[in-house]
Image: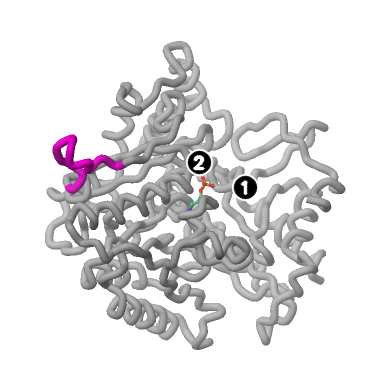
Amino acid sequence: MKEWAEENHLIITEARGSFLKDITGKWYIDGVSSIWVTVHGHRKKEINDAIKEQVDKISHSTLLGLTHPPAAILAEKLVKLIQKSLGSRSGRGERPFAPELSRVFYSDNGSTAVEIALKMAFQYWRHKGIKGKKTFLSLNNGYHGDTIGAVSVGGIDLFHNIFSPLLFKTYKAPSPYCYRCELGKKLRSCRLFCLQAMEKIMNKHQKEIAALIIEPFVQGAGGMIVAPAGYLEQVRKLCSKYGILMIADEVATGFGRTGKMFACEHESVSPDILCIAKGITGGYLPLAATITTEDIYRAFLGEFRELKTFFHGHTYTGNQLACAAAIANIDLFKKEKTLQKMQKKIEILRKELDKTKELHHVGDIRQKGFMAGIELVKNKKTKEPYPFEERMGWKVCLKARENGVIIRPLGDVVVLMPPLSISQQELKSLVRITAEAVRVVTG
Ligand SMILES: Cc1ncc(COP(=O)(O)O)c(C=O)c1O
C-alpha cells in the first residue's frame, strides 16, 4: 500500500476493441484483457445493445425464490454450449469418463463459483450417507479465488500462507510445473511423477476426499503453468477410479481462452462440477455459474423436512443485466466464428513468443491458446530466479506501459492474455513491445 500510494496511477476512462484509453488521452493495448475477462473486445455493439435493452426492462430481481427470462435462457445456452464442448449423453458414445453437465447454479464471481462447488461436493456425499468425505485434494500452485474456502484449496504460498490458521485442511498434489519439476526432467517424467504422487494421495485418503479441484490445463495465477499433454485426462480417470468428484475450475480458462470453448475439451474430459466466471459476460459484468450433473442435482431433492436444501445464495446471483450480457457474449462466438478465427492468431502468438526465447533472461515460455507467460530468470542455465525484491516482472510491465501496452505480471512471469478478438497486427505489436521491454529491463 505504501508503494501504491507513492506511484503515479494510470486512470482509465474509455476503451474500444483491444484498447484502453487513459485520462490524458493515451491509448494502450489491453494485453491482459482487463484481468482475463474481455472476450470480443471493449464496447462491443451487440453486448452494449443487449445491456441497454435489458436496462429498460429491469436491471435486477432476486433469484432467491423467483426467476427471470435472462437467467433461464442463459442456463439453457450454457448447458448446450458445455455439452457441445464436453460431451452430452446422446453424443458422447463410449466415453466412460464423461458425466453430463446439465444443472446451473448462478453466483457472481469466480471465488463464489468455487465456494459453491466445494460446498456442493461436500453436501452431496452427506446426502449419499457418506460422512467421512469432508476434505479436498488440490494442487500446489493452484489458485481458485480469495474467499476462505477457495484459499483453503489454493496452493500459492505467497498469497495464501498468511491465512493458514484460518483454513480447513486439504491434501496437495504436485503442480505439473515441468520447467521446475521436482525431477528436473522431461515432460513425460514430470507428468508421470505428478500423476503417481496424486494417485498415492487418492489411494490413501479416498474415504476423506470429497472432490479434487483443478484448473484444467493452465494454472493461471500460479504462473501460467501449462500441464503436459495427457495429464488432465489421467486426472479424470483417477478421480473416477477412487470415487472422488472432479471440480474443473474454468474461471480463467473458459470461454475460448485456451483455443477451445473450455480447456477440458482438449482432452475430452468432463468434470462432475464446472466453475465458470470471468469471460462469461465477455468482460462486462460480474456473473458466475457452477454447473453440475443430474446425479448431483438429484441428491439434493427431498421433502421439506429432510432439509436437503443447498443453503447458499448471493444477493446479486444471476443478475438480469449480467445474464443479458452473457447471452449476447455466447451468441457472438457463433456469429463471429471467434474460435475458428482465433486458431491462426494462436499460431502468430506462438511464433512471436518464440522469438523472445533468445533473450538472455527468458527462462521459459508457456502458452496454451491465448494464455501465455514468459518466465524471467536471473540465470538462464541454472534457472535461478531473480531476488523477490527486485520486482523484475513488474519493472518489465512498467516499461511496456511506456510504450503503449498494459500487462500485469505474476511475480517474474510476464503474462499475455489479449482479448480473443485482437487483430493479428495488434497481437504482433503486443508481443513485440513486451519483448522489447524484457530486453531493455533485463539486459
Ligand atoms: C482459476 C481461477 N479461479 C477462481 C478465480 C477467482 O475469480 P474472482 O476473482 O472472480 O473471484 C480466479 C481469478 O483469477 C481464477 O483464475
The amino acid on which the numbered mark 1 sits, given as a three-letter code, is Gln
Q: Image height check: is 52 above or below 374?
A: above
Q: Nearer the viewer, residue 329 or 11?
A: 11
Of callouts 1 and 2, which one flags the residue occurring earlier in the amino acid sequence?
Answer: 2
The residue to which callout 1 is attached is: 425
Of tags 1 and 2, the one toward the viewer is 2
> Viewer-proximal residue, 67 or 17?
67
Residue 351 visible: no
Above or below, comparing residue 357 to residue 320 in the picture: below
Does 3 sit left or right of 148 as displayed?
right
Q: Which mark is residue 39?
A: 2
In the rendered image, is residue 133 in sight?
Answer: yes
Closer to us: 205 or 173: 205
Q: Nearer the viewer, residue 424 or 395?
A: 395
* Location of the C terminus (image quadrant): bottom right
Magenta span: predominant SS is loop
Is residue 36 on the magenta stretch? no
* Residue 38: % across, % down: 54, 40
